[in-house]
Image: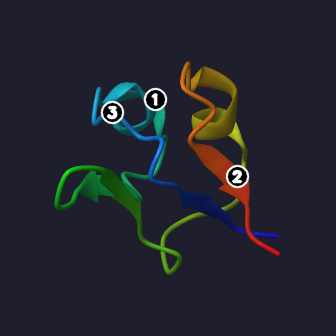
Amino acid sequence: MSFVITKECTDCGNCQDVCPLGAISEGFGRREINADYCTECGTCFIVCENHAIKPEN
């Protein structure tokens, strides 16, 4: 199960700061997760204060 960053993202950068593999980068108005590098550890999901990171269906 991979994660996606939704429109609730405020672009605070907390998720990018904690990602152990650098899979999160700046996008256009919100961060983006590069699925090729993401190991689905869930750290970004845990630290997101805006609940903007969701498991992808």
Which circle marks residue 10 in the picture? 3
The 10 Å Cα crowd at callout 3, few under 14, some 14 to 19, many 20 or more, is some
The image shows residue 40, relative to residue 45, as above or below, that is below
In the drawing, does residue 32 fall left or right of residue 45? Answer: left
C-alpha separation, residue under disc 2 versus residue under disc 3: 14 Å
Q: Which quadrant is home to the N terminus?
A: bottom right
Mark found first going from the N terminus, 3 or 1? 3
Q: Are marks 1 and 2 in contact (CB under 8 Å)?
A: no
* Position of residue 8 measured from the top left corner of the image (x, y, whole percent): 48, 41
Badge 1 is on which residue? 18
* Position of residue 44 measured from the top left corner of the image (x, y, whole percent): 57, 37
| Marks 1, 2: nearer the viewer | 2
In the drawing, does residue 52 fall left or right of residue 39? Answer: left
Q: Residue at (21%, 60%) from the top-left corner?
A: 27
User: What type is the residue that disc 1 sits on?
Assistant: Val
Q: Nearer the viewer, residue 47 or 23?
A: 47
Q: Nearer the viewer, residue 30 or 23?
A: 30
User: What type is the residue that disc 2 sits on?
Assistant: Lys
User: What type is the residue that disc 3 sits on?
Assistant: Thr
Q: Dot 3: what SS?
A: loop
Mark found first going from the N terminus, 1 or 2? 1
The image shows residue 46, relative to residue 57, as above or below, that is above
* Position of residue 57 measured from the top left corner of the image (x, y, whole percent): 83, 75
Residue extending farthest bottom:
36
* Position of residue 47 measured from the top left corner of the image (x, y, whole percent): 59, 22
Residue extending farthest front:
7
